[in-house]
Image: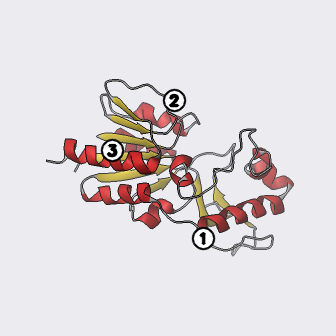
């Protein structure tokens, strides 16, 4: 089987009704990003941060995977599919994808502020006073601005092994995730799906100027024709 590495961003989840929650003015639900997604913001106002993610969690549990998520899961029958997502939702997993690497953490998990390796599944509100066994406050299992991206090395390894790369719903402008593409083997065919693409097509880069749902479906057919005998 060919190794198909899929890089996904907010665009694919938006079509399930997930708010990207970053407005044109840079505010997230009326908050400066550093208030709700940084270690400094956490130190200043844990209650605000917890409330912000509690609302995100509730919203996530009210939506469902869309056809783009499901088509990616179905591609596992013909390709060795590894998904590297910047999204913190679980929609890829719910659609049936079995190899999903979350660069920026997972909304339905929390972790200890004492030991970052103490990670717990969490589907309800997280409140002040919710402690780990060491009696330390739990926090969202999300990579905040200014924090290291612990899954980056695994993601790089996946990209170096790619036979085909698909990029969906992400501008690939935010680092370190944007740097992943630099690790692709030379001459690897890359397919870019975005309704407002910021890249130009070339010999190895094919652009689908479409939303995820329609673009992924079309591309899946093309990949099967091209790579599956």
Residue 114 versus residue 184: which sits nearer the camera?
A: 184
Pinpoint residue 169: horizontal percent, then vertical percent.
50, 44
Residue marked by disc 2: 198
Pinpoint residue 122: horizontal percent, then vertical percent.
62, 72
- Residue drawn at point x = 71 percent, y = 39 percent: 24
Between disc 3 and disc 1, the foreground one is: 3
Residue marked by disc 3: 219
Residue 34 versus residue 183: which sits nearer the camera?
A: 34
Pinpoint residue 103: horizontal percent, then vertical percent.
53, 49
The image's colouring method is secondary structure
- For residue 114, say whether it is visible: no
Structural distance between the alpha carbons of marks 3 and 1: 36 Å
Residue 99 versus residue 170: which sits nearer the camera?
A: 170
- Badge 2: how crowded within 10 Å, few (<14), some, or many (20+)? few
- For residue 138, say whether it is visible: yes
Residue marked by disc 1: 120
Structural distance between the alpha carbons of marks 3 and 2: 19 Å
């Amino acid at each position: 089987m060919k190794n198909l590495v899929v890089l996904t961003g907010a665009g694919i989840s938006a079509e399930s009704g997930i708010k990207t929650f970053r407005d044109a003015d840079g505010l997230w639900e009326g908050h400066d990003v550093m208030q709700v997604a940084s270690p400094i913001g956490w130190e200043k106002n844990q209650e605000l941060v917890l409330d912000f993610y509690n609302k995100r969690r509730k919203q996530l549990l009210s939506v469902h995977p869309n056809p783009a998520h499901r088509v990616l899961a179905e591609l596992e029958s013909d390709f060795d599919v590894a998904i590297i997502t910047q999204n913190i939702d679980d929609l890829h997993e719910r659609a049936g994808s079995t190899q999903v690497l979350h660069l920026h953490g997972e909304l339905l998990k929390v972790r200890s502020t004492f030991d970052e390796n103490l990670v717990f599944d969490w589907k309800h509100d997280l409140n002040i006073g919710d402690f780990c066994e060491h009696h330390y406050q739990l926090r969202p299992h999300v990579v905040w601005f200014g924090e290291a991206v612990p899954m980056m090395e695994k993601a790089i390894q996946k990209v170096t092994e790619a036979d085909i790369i698909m990029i969906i719903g992400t501008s690939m402008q935010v680092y370190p995730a944007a740097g992943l593409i630099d690790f692709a083997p030379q001459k690897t065919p890359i397919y870019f799906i975005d309704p407002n693409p910021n890249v130009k097509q070339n010999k190895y880069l094919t652009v689908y100027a479409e939303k995820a749902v329609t673009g992924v479906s079309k591309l899946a057919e093309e990949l099967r024709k091209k790579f599956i005998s």
